[in-house]
Amino acid sequence: MGKILVVNYSQTGQLNEIIDQFLSPFDPDRIERHQIFPVTPYVFPWTTEEFFDKMPECVEEDTIPLKPISYTAQQYDLIVLGYQPWFLSPSPPVTSLLKDPTFQSILRGTPVVTVIGGRNMWLNSQESIKKLIKNAGGKLVGNIPLMDRTSNLISAFTILHWMLTGRKDRKWNIFPLPGVSEQDIESASKFGAIVNSAAAKSDYGNLQNEILGTGLIEIPTDILFIEQRAKKLFRIWAKLIKTKGTTPAKRKRLVSFFKYYLLIALFMVAPVILFVYNLLIVPFTGNTIKKKKQYFCGVETK
Ligand SMILES: Cc1cc2nc3c(=O)[nH]c(=O)nc-3n(C[C@H](O)[C@H](O)[C@H](O)COP(=O)(O)O)c2cc1C
């Protein structure tokens, strides 16, 4: 049996913990594990300004320089790619890895399982990842998204607390803990066991069904609704900020507008629209919603 290449980025260490759990059922001798490190690390905790300033380049999938990775082989039996969505797009370290010619040559003809550790919006970023893998000639055979299960508004609030203070604790001692719950992080070992047995047989035909069969992965209808609309708006903002933000002062002003736009859209506009949508539209579009969720839960590319 050949080796399994495991590669991921993690800024706070959350995704490292998820991958640790995921790998626990595997034979360690079969695993070659690497972390992605940007040449210039992202500062953590974030300042509000730096956090929102990352949006345009994330959305336009620009690359950043990465520290070189010393792979011990040119081909692997399986690749496990761990990543996190940033602004409904893959985080730049992962976009950069997927656009790196050396990694692309390793990807060619190789099955890939993605493991995502995010807040709650991974649908758009996974569509980008599917395309990047496909363009390099790889084959996505499984996807395991682990998310914060609290409501969209609460998780937005708690993740901002975490990102801007660097503390993964309860805000004011009343809010829930930010990020993927301990229980869900531990559950990654269940997914690891499923992928491990598929890898032992080199048969990934039913892998995604088995992953979904755990019942641990679900797409809330509200999230589906928001993701289907928000990325288009992010793209408009990204283009605007990049083309009109030609000096640091202009860019700063535009990013600040985007920040207020996003906070108002998320905390004030979306709840009203979602209330109406859930009341008037959802009851009549159950089948369409179900089909869309099935697509996003799967590994096929449109
Ligand atoms: C700049 C930025 C943007 C983010 N945008 C999203 C997002 O669009 N969707 C999402 O589910 N999580 C988002 N997150 C949360 C991350 O996906 C991730 O859960 C968190 O950063 C911790 O991951 P880590 O393992 O890299 O520390 C964002 C985080 C950052 C720093």
Image (cartoon, rainbow, N blue to C red):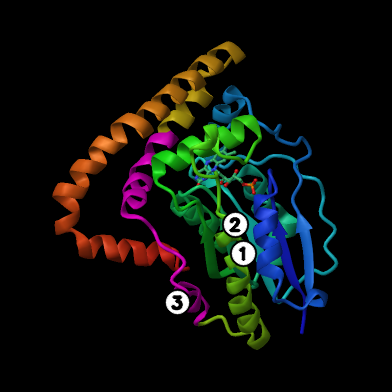
Q: Is residue 97 above or below residue 249?
A: below
Cα gap from disc 1 to disc 2, whole angstroms: 6 Å
Q: Is residue 124 magenta?
A: no
Ligand 1's quadrant is top right
Check disc 1 and report its element: helix, strand or loop: helix
Whether residue 302 is visible here, answered yes or no, is no
Q: Is residue 187 above or below residue 14?
A: below
Tell me, for residue 186, which label it has, or none.
1
Q: Do the CB atoms of the residues marked 1 and 2 lie less than 8 Å apart?
A: yes
Give the residue type at disc 1. Answer: Glu
Is label 2's Cβ within 8 Å of ligand 1?
A: no
Does residue 62 appear left or right of residue 275 in this picture? Answer: right
Q: Residues within 10 Å of mark 3 (few under 14, many from 20)?
A: few
Cα gap from disc 1 to disc 3, whole angstroms: 17 Å
Image quadrant in which the C terminus is located? bottom left
Cα gap from disc 2 to disc 3, whole angstroms: 21 Å
**Image x and y of residue 188, in percent:** 60, 66
Q: Nearer the viewer, residue 172 or 118?
A: 172
Does residue 219 appear left or right of residue 289 in this picture? Answer: right
Give the residue type at disc 2. Answer: Glu
Residue at (48%, 39%) from the top-left corner? 175
The answer to which of marks 1 and 3 sits earlier in the sequence is 1
Q: Is residue 217 magenta?
A: yes
The answer to which of marks 2 and 3 sits earlier in the sequence is 2
Name the residue beneath numbered marker 3: 213
**Image x and y of residue 69, in percent:** 81, 54
**Image x and y of residue 141, in percent:** 55, 72
Span colored in magenta: 206-235
Tell me, for residue 182, which label it has, or none.
2
Residue at (65%, 54%) from the top-left corner? 15
Residue at (64%, 88%) from the top-left corner? 201
